[in-house]
Image: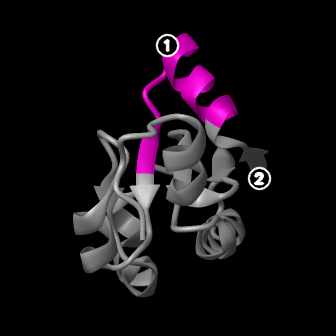
């Protein structure tokens, strides 16, 4: 699993031709409060039941509030055979601080 800072992820999304899945693993109330455009919500506890909906050949960027839950899900996805996982270190909190200063925080 790769670890990207918010700035690294922002540049990766701008400069890369592939369209990674931006997988937000927070709870619905957190996602409703703020999220990165284009991200898809599957709360952490629902990932095992929705694993079939994820493409193991696609780059998946895992996102949470501070990067801890997403790191756990990244490790889990790798254990299930997913090979192209990126964890957003610092989560949406870092994204709001370093990339989108207008994003709501909590």
User: What's the residue at 37%, 66% (across, down)?
Assistant: 52
User: What's the residue at 60%, 76% (across, down)?
Assistant: 69
For disc 2, the marked residue is 1
Question: Residue 53 location, x and y as percent?
Answer: 32, 61
* Colour scheme shown: one colour
Image position of 79 (left or right of 61)? right
User: What's the residue at 43%, 27% (across, down)?
Assistant: 19
**Above/below status of 17 relative to 50:** above
Question: Residue 101 location, x and y as percent?
Answer: 45, 40
Q: Circle 2 sits in a helix, a strand or a loop, which is it? A: loop
Of the 4 image quadrants, the one containing the C terminus is bottom left
In the foreground, 100 or 5: 100
Spatial distance from mark 2 to mark 1, Cα to Cα?
Answer: 20 Å
Q: Magenta part of the protein: which range?
A: 7-22
In the foreground, 39 or 56: 39
For disc 1, the marked residue is 17
On whether residue 9 falls in the magenta region, the answer is yes
Question: Residue 104 location, x and y as percent?
Answer: 34, 56
Label 2: how many Cα within 10 Å (few below 14, some 14–19, many 20+): some
Question: Residue 34 location, x and y as percent?
Answer: 31, 58
User: What's the residue at 49%, 47% (across, down)?
Assistant: 96
User: Hey, which quadrant is residue 42 in on the image?
Assistant: bottom left
Marks 2 and 1, the one that precedes in the sequence? 2
**Above/below status of 29 relative to 36:** below
Q: Circle 1 sits in a helix, a strand or a loop, which is it? A: loop
């Amino acid at each position: 699993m790769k670890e990207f800072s918010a700035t690294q992820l922002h540049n990766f999304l701008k400069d890369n031709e592939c369209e990674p899945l931006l997988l937000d693993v927070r709870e619905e109330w957190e996602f409703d409060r703020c999220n990165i455009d284009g991200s898809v919500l599957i709360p952490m506890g629902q990932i095992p039941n929705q694993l079939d909906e994820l493409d193991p050949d696609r780059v998946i960027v895992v996102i949470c509030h501070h990067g801890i839950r997403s790191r756990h899900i990244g490790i889990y996805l790798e254990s299930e055979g997913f090979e192209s996982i990126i964890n957003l270190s610092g989560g949406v909190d870092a994204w709001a601080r370093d990339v989108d200063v207008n994003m709501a925080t909590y």
